[in-house]
């Protein structure tokens, strides 16, 4: 396996490794150069012993192909993958910037107008993936790359699911990402869903707006137990500047039951956009609003909401809690006209034509 201080090397007789930019328990990340297409790339080189596991190789190939089909401005593009004597690797678009975990440590607590635009971009990425039938399974700030102009891209789609194919005997010394962001159902080994990604986004939101993680423990087992059974401290107790509406959104994301959360990242993004519009207007009135990042464009590129999100169908129950929260946000921001329009389009499917 390549060590941190190893000299420049090649992968697949095509990619020249320039220098290491990240390191974890499962992989090293390099800035590299594609000599065939003459462009910079990022390469994640997984642990060498993984390449010896046939089940993992097959699952990794399948997940890499699925990730390569995701084409979205907020998702890091997968260009290639391969198996080399040095290990299994995946080649991705190179995006200059720092991961969100670094940005949080650097900044501390985010304001509404600085933090929500980033998470809306993450919601756009996850919503697109969810509609394609792909659950990320490892949403955390370390997998969100933020450029200096505040564009966010999500990376590492499918790697967590590929790792799930490794049998228990080979899992003993694997560092499983960051259990701080793991949903309760994933911790129990249950099949993840879009709501699992929403829970992880809720942990990221909590960290951005309080400067702390919702749960801390001495061991992974204890941490998982807290995710499964203990309610988090309300964000406003740690940061009184966190708006009440945003606190409600964060706590809903962190619900223990998947059915109690926002059903999709698209749905979460739509509510966050309403809150952002309200507080952006208030900040603008004070003439000290920060420049809106070019990737946000909430009004021109709103989070996609499928008809299914608002049409319960014959066998589903009405999500009255969600409807109530969105009605409250609409009344606060826009007055009565959007209120009655929302009533019409939300309840029309329940009564037929």
Image: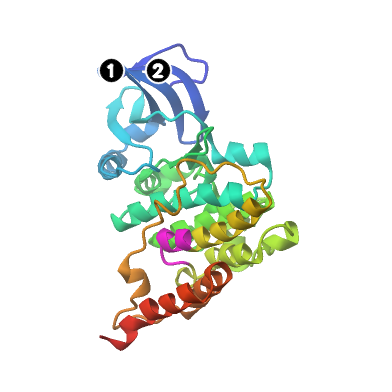
Mark 2 vs mark 1, CA separation in Å: 10 Å
The image shows residue 280 at horizontal and vertical percentages of: 59, 54
- The residue lying at 41 percent from left, 49 percent from top is 168
Q: Are marks 2 and 1 in contact (CB under 8 Å)?
A: no
Does 252 appear above or below 13? below
Q: Which colour scheme is used?
A: rainbow
Question: Which residue is labeled 2 in the image?
Answer: 17
User: Pointer 1: residues within 10 angstroms few (<14), some, or many (20+)?
Assistant: few
As drawn, the residue found furthest toward the top would be: 7
* Residue 143 percent coordinates (x, y): 48, 41
For the question of whether residue 183 can be seen, the reply is no
User: Which residue matches tag 1?
Assistant: 14
Q: Going by the picture, which residue comes out furthest to the bottom?
A: 351
| Residue at left offset 39%, top offset 14% | 9
Element on which disc 2 rests:
strand
Of residues 266 and 229, the one drawn nearer to the viewer in this rendering: 266
Q: The C terminus is located in which quarter? A: bottom left
Magenta run includes residue 268: yes
Q: In this view, does 178 lie to the left or right of 259?
A: right
Q: In this view, does 96 lie to the left or right of 193?
A: right
Q: Where is residue 195 in the image (x, y as percent from the top left)?
A: 43, 63
Whether 255 is among the magenta residues is no
Residue 316 placement (x, y as % from top left): 35, 80
Residue bounds of the magenta highlight: 262-270
Q: Name the main secondary structure of what is drawn in magenta.
A: helix
The residue shown at (28%, 28%) is 83
**Rendering quarter of residue 264:** bottom left
């Amino acid at each position: 396996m390549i060590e941190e201080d190893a000299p420049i090397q090649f992968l697949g007789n095509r990619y020249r490794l320039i220098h290491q930019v990240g390191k974890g328990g499962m992989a090293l990340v390099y800035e590299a150069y594609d000599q065939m297409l003459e462009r910079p790339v990022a390469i994640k080189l997984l642990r060498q012993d993984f390449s010896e596991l046939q089940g993992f190789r097959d699952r990794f190939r399948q997940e890499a192909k699925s990730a390569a089909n995701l084409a979205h401005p907020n998702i890091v593009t997968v260009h290639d993958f391969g198996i080399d004597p040095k290990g299994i690797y995946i080649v991705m678009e190179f995006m200059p910037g720092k991961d969100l975990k670094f940005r949080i440590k650097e900044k501390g607590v985010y304001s509404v107008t600085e933090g929500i635009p980033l998470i809306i971009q993450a919601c756009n990425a996850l919503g697109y993936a969810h509609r394609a039938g792909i659950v990320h399974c490892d949403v955390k700030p370390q997998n969100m790359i933020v450029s200096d102009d505040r564009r966010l891209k999500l990376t590492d789609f499918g790697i967590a699911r590929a790792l799930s194919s490794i049998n228990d005997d080979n899992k003993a010394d694997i560092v499983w990402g960051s259990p701080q962001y793991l949903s309760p159902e994933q911790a129990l080994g249950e099949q993840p869903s879009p709501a699992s990604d929403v829970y992880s986004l809720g942990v990221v939101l909590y960290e951005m707006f309080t400067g702390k993680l919702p749960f801390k423990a001495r061991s992974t087992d204890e941490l998982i137990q807290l995710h499964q059974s203990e309610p988090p401290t309300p964000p406003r107790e740690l940061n009184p500047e966190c708006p009440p509406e945003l606190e409600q959104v964060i706590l809903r994301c962190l619900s223990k039951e998947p059915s109690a959360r926002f059903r999709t990242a698209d749905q979460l993004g739509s509510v966050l956009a309403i809150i952002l519009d309200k507080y952006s207007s208030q900040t603008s009135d004070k003439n000290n609003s920060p420049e809106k990042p070019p990737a946000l464009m909430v009004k021109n590129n709103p989070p996609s909401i499928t008809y299914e999100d608002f049409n319960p169908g014959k066998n589903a129950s009405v999500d009255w809690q969600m409807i109530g929260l969105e009605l409250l946000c609409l009344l606060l921001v826009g007055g009565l006209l959007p209120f009655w329009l929302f009533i019409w389009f939300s309840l029309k499917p329940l009564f037929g034509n």
